[in-house]
Image: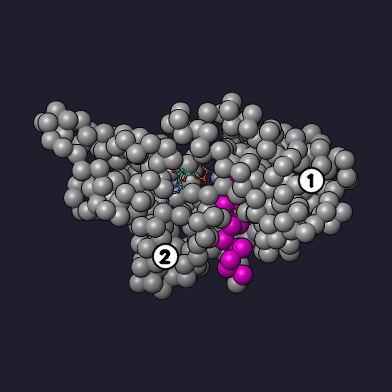
Amino acid sequence: MILAVESSCDETAAAVVKNGREVLSNVIYSQIALHTEFGGVVPEIASRKHIEKINQVVEQALDEAGAGLKDITAVAVTYGPGLVGALLVGVSAAKAISFATGIPLVGVHHIEGHISANFIENKELEPPFVCLVASGGHSHLVVVKGYGEYEIIGRTRDDAAGEAFDKVARAIGLGYPGGPKIDRVSKEGNPDAIHFPRARVADSPYDFSFSGLKSAVLNYLNSCEMKGEPVNTADVAASFQKAVVDVLVEHSIEAVKEYGYGKFAIAGGVASNSALRGAFEQACAENKIAFYHPSPIYCTDNAAMIGVAGYYEYRKGIRHGYDLNAVPNLKLGERI
Ligand code: KG4
Ligand code: ZN
């Protein structure tokens, strides 16, 4: 029984996970409403809200699981990457619980959590497989070789996919949080209305670059303004989204063919995008690849995924001391 805590960005979350794959509770206090008026996450506000909410969220997670601390085997907590002040709240709370009760403490990598979200609803999924992690801060193609064993074969050279969604959403006046809004508006637009570039990185088939695409959207908006032409927001959103989806799908399918496991999973906030999921369903079916994805609630930040990753880390014998610190730029596969 893992009690998991996640506070790396703007969600204060706690969960109880049994035997690695059974979620007994998954409590998420989202701060989105609080940050909306600023057009993005304000780190200092996020940290302060985490402090206010963390104990309440942990208690609720235990209550909903029908568990007490006496039932808990280990406390798992995200210690990086993320916003340092935000991470510190979860890390401090987990260390306090561990110190007060003697329950072992396990620090978890946030992206390892995102990848592990796939194990919750796909009981048959086991490594090795290829996973695309697309979140607000990361766009990685990862070979999951075993539990807690990763090889990053592709990464973004500039903006992450989610970051591009957020920046373009702001530019076309949809505001924060950008991804879900573009997803929704795109359903009313024509994805072939405007051709935006699909970037390739010269020497690496699996790396991504989204800043050129973002600039192309901004240039398009500027030129419309200069010519006095109206902008069809839904068409811009749908065409931008199609450009991101095309690149993510093409690189991922190439990677799965090259690495040959015939299994592919997606993770991170952008993995909840409906057009992306549809495109992967189709591409994987055409290429006879088994496709796995978490439900949207396990794609965006949550603690259940940290509980799953924490379970496999615990089983490997990973334990952390009370000197565990927040590591804002923690690398995937790195343990500190
Ligand atoms: O994984 P996540 O919740 O937090 C990070 O670890 O970054 O990802 C948040 C990112 C944001 O950039 C958000 O705009 C994007 O995921 N996102 C989406 C969708 N839902 C969230 N992007 C595209 N379509 C969505 N439906
Ligand atoms: Zn995340």
Kind of residue at badge 2: Lys
Q: Nearer the viewer, residue 26 or 99?
A: 26
Residue 257 badge: 2
Q: Which quarter of the frame holds ligand 2?
A: top right
Which structural element holds mark 2? helix
Q: Nearer the viewer, residue 102 or 328?
A: 102
Q: CA distance from mark 1 to mark 2?
A: 39 Å
User: Could you tell me if residue 203 is visible in this image?
Assistant: no
Residue 146 versus residue 197 in the image, above or below:
below
Q: Nearer the viewer, residue 113 or 96?
A: 96
For this orientation, the residue located farthest to the top is 44
| Residue 264 placement, left or right of 105 | left
Badge 1: residue crowd in 10 Å (few <14, some 14–19, many ≥20): many
Dominant secondary structure of the residues highlighted in magenta in the image: helix
- Residue shown at the point (68%, 64%) measured from the top left: 22
Kindly tell me whether mark 1's CB lies below 8 Å from ligand 2: no
| Residue 53 placement, left or right of 115 | right
- Residue shown at the point (16%, 37%) measured from the top left: 230
Residue 105 badge: 1
- Residue shown at the point (42%, 65%) measured from the top left: 257
| Residue 98 placement, left or right of 261 | right
User: Could you tell me if residue 283 is visible in this image?
Assistant: yes
| Residue 331 placement, left or right of 137 | right
Q: Quadrant of residue 67?
A: bottom right
Residue 261 versus residue 313 in the image, above or below:
below
Residue stretch rendered in magenta on the structure: 110-123
Q: Position of residue 258 (x, y in %)?
A: 43, 62
